[in-house]
Image (cartoon, rainbow, N blue to C red):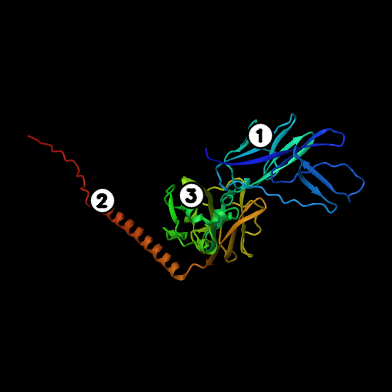
């Protein structure tokens, strides 16, 4: 297991009050500690604290007050997926002292399944993510008083993965954007050596069964050359835009203008570092498509089917809404959800025009796609062709019938007639 360790040191201030009683105050090394004082009846006094047997002057407070600057040594940046190890080091533990840890979101780590807290107050967090980036706090409690020891933790991670697929639609104007960038500004010390740290990377694509191509075959779209400088090497001619890397350093996002059903599938952005460490982000792309049967041009009176699909059955949380032309014979449509297959029994001129299919999840429209349906009269040449074909069929049928009748007639004529039997009466 890989760990990145950090140590928080706690110092103890032992002081004696005017009554001679001893008390204990915990504080972080390099941080601020508040020592109790009695009420003198006026703030316009000078107070001086001494430390140790040698009576070393520790704090001097005049009537105008004092200022402290707090400095905490940060933990070295670490990659997401690593394990974080922090120690809350108390030089001397008095009976009744308790320690606990707070995450950057101020949540108690005792309730985090990834966290392991040792008897000595040490903290181990397994498999950190970008959400663990921030200030971690060790809380030391003694006799109702709390001391806070803070340390910043920097977790280098890619942008959060999409909880849902990326939805787009088939269109030459549609823009497919695949985000992949670092979730936080990179630390200066790490950024200076980034080209030495990054060993490479790539975008890969695995088509879905609805893509109409080789299912399950992983395709490498682009490779990241470590340089210097960092640069993309394109492997697939799919109209990919990789200029984000040049516009903004270490923005690994891709985009593509003009979406087809072949873009359906799973995309993976991977960045490789030294020691075989890799950061990955996966995202699924769903493409909405609409098509008509028998085609985008239909004739008056013809049955027309319009299909709106993702290439696979919709999940229970998705639904489609049809927006037909204003003069369509199907208006008004029933309340949603609408069927993915819409049938026009007999096409009219009112059914011609722009049909739009929208994909919704609850009250959120995810994407939409449009198609233009054209309704025409059956052209004269088509009617003529139909008439000629019908006449030819009738002629052939009559010809076949005539041949059959002639053959039967000939068979009857050529059939030999049976003669009458004659009997001979012979007389002697």
Sequence order check: which comes first, mark 1 or mark 3?
1
* Residue 365 image label: none
Taking depth in this image into account, of 5 and 32 the one nearest to the observer is 32
Dot 1: few (<14), some (14–19), or many (≥20) neighbours within 10 Å?
A: some
Residue 234: image location, x then y, percent: 43, 59
Residue density around tag 3, few if under 14, some if 14–19, many if 20 or more, within 10 Å? some
Q: Which residue is mark 2?
A: 412
Secondary structure of the residue carrying tag 1 is loop
Establish if 355 lies above or below 381: above
Closer to the eye: label 2 or 1: 1
Q: Is residue 419 left or right of residue 336?
A: left
| Residue at 28% over, 56% down | 406
Position in image of residue 50 (x %, y %) = 78, 42
Q: Dot 2: what SS?
A: helix
The label number, if any, that marks residue 273 in the structure image = 3
**SS for callout 3:** strand
Residue 396 visible: yes
């Amino acid at each position: 297991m890989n760990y990145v360790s950090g140590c928080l040191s706690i110092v103890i201030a032992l002081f004696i009050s005017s009554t001679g009683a001893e008390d204990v105050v915990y504080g972080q090394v390099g941080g601020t500690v508040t020592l109790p004082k009695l009420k003198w009846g006026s703030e316009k006094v000078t107070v001086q604290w001494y430390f140790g047997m040698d009576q070393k002057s520790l704090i001097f407070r005049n009537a105008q007050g004092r200022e402290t600057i707090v400095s905490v040594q940060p933990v070295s940046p670490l990659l997401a997926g690593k394990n974080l190890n922090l120690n809350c080091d108390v030089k001397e533990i008095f009976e009744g002292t308790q320690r606990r840890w707070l995450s950057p979101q101020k949540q108690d780590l005792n309730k985090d399944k990834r966290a392991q807290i040792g008897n000595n107050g040490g903290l181990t967090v397994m498999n950190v993510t970008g959400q663990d980036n921030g200030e971690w706090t060790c809380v030391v409690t003694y006799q109702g008083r709390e001391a806070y020891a803070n340390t910043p933790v920097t977790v280098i991670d890619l942008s959060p993965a999409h909880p849902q697929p990326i939805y787009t639609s088939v269109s030459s104007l549609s823009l497919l954007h695949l985000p992949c960038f670092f979730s936080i500004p990179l630390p200066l010390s790490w950024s200076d050596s980034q080209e030495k740290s990054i060993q490479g990377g790539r975008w890969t694509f695995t088509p879905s069964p609805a893509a109409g191509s080789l299912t399950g075959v992983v395709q490498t779209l682009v490779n990241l050359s470590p340089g210097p400088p960092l640069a993309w090497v394109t492997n697939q001619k799919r109209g990919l835009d990789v200029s984000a890397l040049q516009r903004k350093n270490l923005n690994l996002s891709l985009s593509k203008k003009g979406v087809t059903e072949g873009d359906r599938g799973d995309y993976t952005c991977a960045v490789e570092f030294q020691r075989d460490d890799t950061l990955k982000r996966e995202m699924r792309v769903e493409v909405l498509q609409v098509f008509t049967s028998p085609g985008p041009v239909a004739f008056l009176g013809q049955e027309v089917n319009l299909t709106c699909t993702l290439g696979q059955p919709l999940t229970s949380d998705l639904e489609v809404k049809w927006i037909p032309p204003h003069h369509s014979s199907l208006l008004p449509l029933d309340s949603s959800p609408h069927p993915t297959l819409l049938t026009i029994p007999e096409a009219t001129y009112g059914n011609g025009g722009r049909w739009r299919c929208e994909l919704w999840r609850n009250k959120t429209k995810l994407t939409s796609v449009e198609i233009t349906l054209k309704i025409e009269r059956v052209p004269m040449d088509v009617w003529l062709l139909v008439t000629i074909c019908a006449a030819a069929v009738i002629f052939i049928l009559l010809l076949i019938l005539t041949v059959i009748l002639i053959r039967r007639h000939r068979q009857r004529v050529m059939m030999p007639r049976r003669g009458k039997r004659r009997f001979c009466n012979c007389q002697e």
